[in-house]
Amino acid sequence: MGTREYAKAARPTFYFIGVTTGKSSIMKVFPQWAKFLGLTDVEMKGIDFKPHDEPEAYRQAVAFIKNDPLSRGALVTTHKIDLLKACRDLFEGLDPYAEMMGEISCISKRNGKLIGHAKDPITSGLAIEAFLPPRYWVETNAAALLLGAGGSSIAITSYLMQTSHGANRPSKIIVTNRSQPRLDEIRHIHRELKAQTPTEYFLTPKPEDNDAVLKNLPSGSLVVNATGLGKDAPGSPLTDGAVFPDKGVVWELNYRGDLIFLAQSEAQRESRNLQIEDGWVYFIHGWTRVIAEVFDIDIAAKGPQFDQLSEIAGRFR
C-alpha cells in the first residue's frame, strides 16, 4: 500500500474522514456555518478511505492530524470502529462512549493531547427526539429493528436502551447483519451496557433474510437502515417485496445516494400508514456536536441558534 502525502495545514483545518466526502452537503454548508458561528479563517478538507481500509492508512491520517499544529480535528463516518482499532495507541484520551463502544466519530485536541469521542449516542438521541413523541414506546409497545450492526446501530441501540428512559423503551430491539463478527461485537457491547431491553440478533446474509425479520414486527415499530447501503454502496438491505409494519416509523440514516430503501418505504407510505424520516436532522446534529467539540465552542442542540443552522444547511440540501 502506498504512503499518502498529507500537506501541512496553512490555517486551522477540520477534516472529514469518510468514503465519498466530496459529495456531502457539508462541503458547501461548513463555510456558511463557520461564518455564522464566528469561526474565521478556517478550512475543511475531506479524506476518503474505502470501507474497512488498511490499518496503516488510518494510522497515517491520524498521526498527521495529531502532529500537525493547525490541524484541529476531524469528524469520522463509516470508519468509526476500524479507525479506532488501528489507531488506539495514538490517542491520549477517549470519552466514556468511545471507550465502551470501541468507536470514534470525532477527533479533537486539548492541551496538546489527541482525544477520541463517540458522539453518535448523543446525536442519534437528539434526532430520535426530534421525530418521535416523548412517550412513544410506552404508548405503542412497538419494537425497534436495526438493519446493520456497525457504529450507527451501536449508537442508536445504546440510546434506546438507556435505563434513564424508565419504561419508555422499545418492547424489543432486533439487530440484523450480513456477517457474524459485527453481530458478536454489538452483542458484547450490549452486555457491557448491562442492557435490560430484550434484544435479538439475526445473521441476514441476503436481503430476503431481512424481509423475513421485518414481517414479524408489531404495529408502530421503528425500522432503521443503518447499513450504509444507499450511500456508501448502492442498493438496499431489503427486497422490493418487503412489507413494513403497519403505522411503522421508517428511518433511513442516509440523506444522499440512490436511497432505494427510502423509495421502498415511500411506495408503502399510504397502504401501511408509515411515518418516514431520512438522515437530514441526524446529519445536522452529528456535525454541530463535532464542530462544537473540535473548535471548543458552545452550539445549541435546539432553539433559535440550532434552527438558524438548520436553515443555512437546508439551502444546500
Image (cartoon, rainbow, N blue to C red):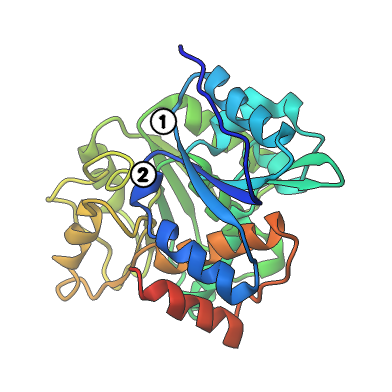
User: Can residue 285 be seen from the camera position used here?
Assistant: yes
Q: Residues within 10 Å of mark 1 (few under 14, many from 20)?
A: few
Question: In what element is the residue under mark 2?
Answer: loop
In the rendered view, does 259 fall on the left or right side of 136? left
Task: Compare residues 235 and 23 and report the one nearer the observer.
Answer: 23
The image quadrant where one finds the C terminus is bottom left
Circle 1 sits on which residue? 51
Identify the residue shown where x is 46% and y is 62%.
283
Query: Hey, which quadrant is residue 115 in on the image?
Result: top right
How far apart marks 1 and 2 lie (CA) works out to 10 Å
Please, which residue is most extreme toward the front here? 10
In the rendered view, does 2 fall on the left or right side of 37? left
Circle 2 sits on which residue? 228
Please, which residue is most extreme toward the right here? 111
Instruction: Name the amino acid, label 1.
Output: Pro
User: Which percent across, then down, holds residue 139?
Assistant: 49, 78
Question: In what element is the residue under mark 1?
Answer: loop
User: Can residue 169 be seen from the camera position used here?
Assistant: no
Report if the CB atoms under discs 1 and 2 are less than 8 Å apart: yes
Count of number-bearing discs: 2
- Which label was assigned to residue 68? none
In the rendered view, does 38 fall on the left or right side of 154? right
User: Which percent across, then down, holds residue 18?
Assistant: 45, 41
Q: Is residue 128 above or below residue 94?
A: below
Instruction: Name the amino acid, label 2.
Output: Gly
User: Which percent across, then down, holds residue 119?
Assistant: 63, 54
Q: Earlier in the sequence, mark 1 or mark 2?
A: 1
Task: Compare residues 92 and 224 and report the one nearer the observer.
Answer: 92
Identify the residue shown where x is 56% and y is 18%.
56
Please, which residue is most extreme toward the top here? 1
Query: Hey, which quadrant is residue 99 in on the image?
Result: top right
Q: Nearer the viewer, mark 1 or mark 2?
A: 1
